[in-house]
Structure formats: C-alpha cells, structure tokens
Image (cartoon, rainbow, N blue to C red):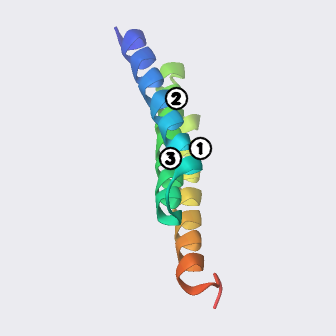
Amino acid sequence: MLDTVLLIVFSMIGLSLLLNLWRLIIGPSVPDRILALDTMYINVIALIILYGISMGTGLYFEAALLIAMLGFISTVAVCKYLLRGDIIE
C-alpha cells in the first residue's frame, strides 16, 4: 500500500514541479518568478523526503534540511537585491 501511495505522490509533486517551471518561465512579473522558484525549492524538498521514506534511510532528510536552508537564504538574498539593489550593505 505504501508503495502505491508513494508512486502517486511522486507523480503529483512532479506535476507540481512542471507547473512551477511554467510559472517561472512565463511569469508576468519578477515577484511571481521568485515565488515560483521558492515553491520549487519546497517541492524538491518534498521529493527528497519521499525518496528517503521509500529507501528507508535518514541520510536524505539531512540533505532536505540543507536544501531548505539554502532555499531560504537565496530567496531572502534575491528579495533584498530587488528591493535595495544591493545584497550586502
């Protein structure tokens, strides 16, 4: 039963990644593109966690945590650049 559910969730998150990529490419404004990129980080984290569940190992959870930290820092840096024109003051 768990294998079937994991396959369904993998496909749903994969579809979500494709839709986010479409929004990233065609987004009408820069904030929409930033939001799409941030959502893609979250979807990649979900895929890594699901893969860790399917493999039965805890190593992938640490990788997901690292990607979450990098995603947060990069989103903050891009937003700060767009608001002020400079990342480091």
Quick one: label 2 or label 3, which is nearer the N terminus? 3
Q: Nearer the viewer, mark 2 or mark 3?
A: 3
Q: Position of residue 64 (x, y in %)?
A: 54, 44
x, y (%) of residue 88?
Answer: 65, 85
Q: Are marks 1 and 2 in contact (CB under 8 Å)?
A: no
Q: CA distance from mark 2 to mark 3?
A: 28 Å
Q: Are marks 1 and 3 in contact (CB under 8 Å)?
A: no
Q: Earlier in the sequence, mark 1 or mark 2?
A: 2
Query: How far apart are labels 1 and 2 at the CA level?
Result: 10 Å
Q: Secondary structure at mark 3?
A: helix
SS for dot 2? helix
Mark number displayed over residue 11: none
Q: Nearer the viewer, residue 62 or 22?
A: 22
Amino acid type of the residue tagged 3 in the rendering? Arg
Judge whether residue 70 can be spotted in this image. yes
Q: Residues within 10 Å of mark 2 (few under 14, many from 20)?
A: some
Amino acid type at mark 2? Gly
Q: Residue at x 47, y 23 (%)?
A: 10
For mark 1, give the secondary structure.
Answer: helix
- Mark 1 highlights which residue? 63
Q: Earlier in the sequence, mark 1 or mark 3?
A: 3
Give the residue displayed 58% in from the left and 36% down from the top. 59
Answer above or below: position of 1 versus 11: above
Give me the C-alpha separation between circle 1 and circle 3.
26 Å
Q: Residue 23 or 41: which is nearer the viewer?
A: 23
Percent x, y of residue 36:
49, 51
The percent position of residue 54, horizontal first and vertical second, equals 49, 20
- Which mark is drawn over residue 52? 2
Q: Which mark is residue 23?
A: 3
